[in-house]
Every structure is written in C-alpha cells, then in structure tokens.
Image (tube, rainbow, N blue to C red):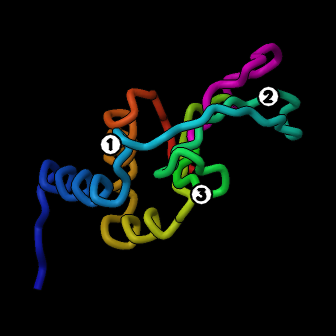
C-alpha cells in the first residue's frame, strides 16, 4: 500500500514527533566554547538538556559562529550555525522514513522552538 503525505502534513508529523521527544521550550541550556584545531578558532556552543545539572546528559548541541572570525572564509563558515542531536537515532529514523525531505523541517522546528538561527544539521 502506498501513502501520499502532503508537505504540510509532513511538517506537522515531524514537529509533533520532535515536540514529544524534546521539550525545547522548557529545556535548560548552557553556553560554552571549544578550540577547533582544524581552523584555529574558538567555536561557541549551546548545550540543551532536560535537567538543570545536565553536564553529561545534554541532548542537543548548537554550534554558533566563531568567536574570532578573522581569517575565516565563506567556505569554512558554510556549516555554521548548526546543531545536532546527541542521539543520532532521531536523524536515522527521520531519514529512513522521509529521506532528505526531513532536514529543512527539522531546522525550522529547531529555529522555531529555540529562537536561534541554525542553517544545518550535523
């Protein structure tokens, strides 16, 4: 049997799935940075977690623009800002069900729920 899912229904399905899995509006977050040895710059990050003390239990990482952008070219900045789910089973499941069609919808969900501006999913 073949099912046809309209674009708006696909968005609703993915938003509901992610909202049930991640309550981003009520998550705790923490900012940090790390030194990227490949590019020689600091990358700012935001970690999202369900508990206030989530140092090792965060569920999403958001990579912001570099803190020191001197010397960066457009090619190196293409992937920023972006985010990733720590549990990559989420993206595997969505990819298996919807192919690459899920990516812009998940990015829209993340931006909508956090107020941040991600361009990509890692």
The residue beneath circle 2 is 42
The kind of secondary structure element at disc 3 is loop
User: Which span is picked out in magenta?
Assistant: 62-76
Residue at image location 64% in from the left, 25% down from the top:
65
Task: Say which residue appears at 21% left-offset and 50% top-offset.
Answer: 11
Q: Which residue is mark 3?
A: 57
Q: Position of residue 115 (x, y in %)?
A: 38, 27
In this rendering, the answer to whether 87 lies above or below 9 is below
* Residue corresponding to mark 1: 109
User: Residue 30 location in percent, x, y?
Assistant: 60, 36
Ranked by sequence position, the earlier of labels 1 and 2 is 2
Residue 62 visible in the shown view: yes
> SS for tag 1?
helix
Residue 23 pos. (x, y %): 34, 49
Of marks 1 and 3, the one in the foreground: 3
Q: Please state if 30 lies on the left or on the right of 1 as rendered.
A: right
Quadrant containing the N terminus in the rendered view: bottom left
């Amino acid at each position: 049997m073949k099912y046809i899912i309209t674009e708006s229904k696909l968005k609703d399905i993915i938003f509901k799935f992610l909202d049930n899995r991640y309550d981003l509006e009520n998550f705790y977050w923490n900012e940090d940075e790390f030194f990227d040895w490949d590019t020689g710059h600091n990358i700012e990050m935001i970690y999202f977690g369900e508990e206030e003390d989530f140092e090792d239990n965060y569920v999403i990482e958001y990579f912001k623009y570099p803190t020191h952008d001197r010397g960066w070219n457009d090619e190196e900045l293409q992937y920023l800002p972006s985010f990733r789910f720590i549990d990559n089973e989420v993206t595997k499941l969505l990819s298996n069900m919807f192919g690459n069609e899920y990516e812009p919808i998940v990015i829209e969900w993340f931006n909508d729920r956090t107020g941040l501006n991600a361009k990509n999913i890692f």
